[in-house]
Amino acid sequence: MSAFGLDGYYEVLHQGCLPLEAVQVHRLPELGHRWTAVEEEVCEELVARRLRRGERLIVLDDGEFPVLDRLDSFEVLESGEWRLRLGPTHYPAHLLTNVEHPKWREAKGDAVMADALAVCALTTTVDGYAVWGRRAAAIPEGAGRWHVVPAGHPEPPQSMAEALFAELDEELGVAADEVEEATFTGIVRSLPTLKPELTARLRLKLTWDEFEARPAKDAWESEQLVGIKWNAEAVAELLVEECGHAIPSGHAATYLAAAQDFGPEWAEETLAKLRA
């Protein structure tokens, strides 16, 4: 389906409704961001500064920062499947370029940008609620803003599906066998940062009360979870009210999931309201 977007907010590069296994990954070991020694030094200074401010950065058990996937390009195959072309970058590079210095793209070119691919999902319960989370104050990206949950960065050699279910388990305490249906819904870019994200839709077998009673394993990124009534009127109102305030990819993931559930007429009317 054709691309569309909201000025200054996000662009939906492609949308659809694909089973998780229909998104292919082609990883190249040498494809990734390219820096000079000066940029490496600036990155080290950035990490130290953020740690001094008390921000909680993502660190592995061995004390190292995770390697992430840099999205170089994607294509839609004749079968309808999506193929993502990825190369290595790392978490500090993402913080430095797409989060802190997105305008480096204009000054230094695409090659300097991390463009770390993330995944996020609009999650609904069987009794008609969608999950949104307010980002914690200590998080270095999007603090205090609303986002869909789960969300995170795949870490090679994870597949996109493995990353999505890992985040679901960590952030919401929900296992893969408690998901009724899982699909990928789009490939989007946040326009303030040009950060790429793969959006998904998860339908749980759980009610909201059952879900809310689950202890999450590692839910530090969200300080509050709320249940949004999942009906055409409530979701349209939410999207209009939070346009420009929620994390761009979370807003997009919600819109794409709702467009599938509530139909093309709802999608066109809501998009017109968002652009008004």
Image (cartoon, helix red, strand yellow):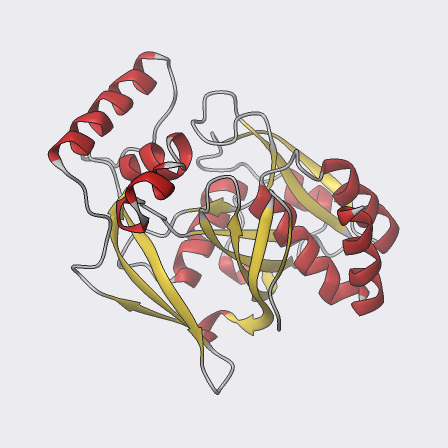
Q: In the shown orientation, is residue 194 left or right of residue 116?
A: right
Residue 271 can be seen in this image:
yes
What residue is shown at x 23% (from left), y 35% (from top)?
A: 61
Q: In the shown orientation, is residue 236 left or right of residue 196?
A: right
Residue farthest to the bottom? 78
Foreground pick, 94 / 171: 94
Q: Is residue 258 above or below residue 136?
A: below
| Number of marks in picture | 0
Q: Quadrant of the N terminus?
A: bottom right
Residue farthest to the left? 37
Residue 4: give x, y in percent of width and height.
63, 60
Residue 94 can be seen in this image:
no
Residue farthest to the right? 233
What residue is shown at x 74% (from left), y 62% (from top)?
A: 259
Foreground pick, 41 / 139: 41
What residue is shown at x 23% (from left), y 29% (from top)?
A: 43
Q: In the shown orientation, is residue 89 left or right of residue 138?
A: left
- Residue 255, quarter of the rendered image: bottom right
What residue is shown at x 46% (from left), y 55% (from top)?
A: 164
Residue 173: give x, y in percent of width and height.
52, 44
Foreground pick, 28 / 211: 28
Residue 31: give x, y in percent of width and height.
21, 59
Residue 159: give x, y in percent of width and height.
36, 63
Q: Is residue 258 above or below residue 57?
A: below
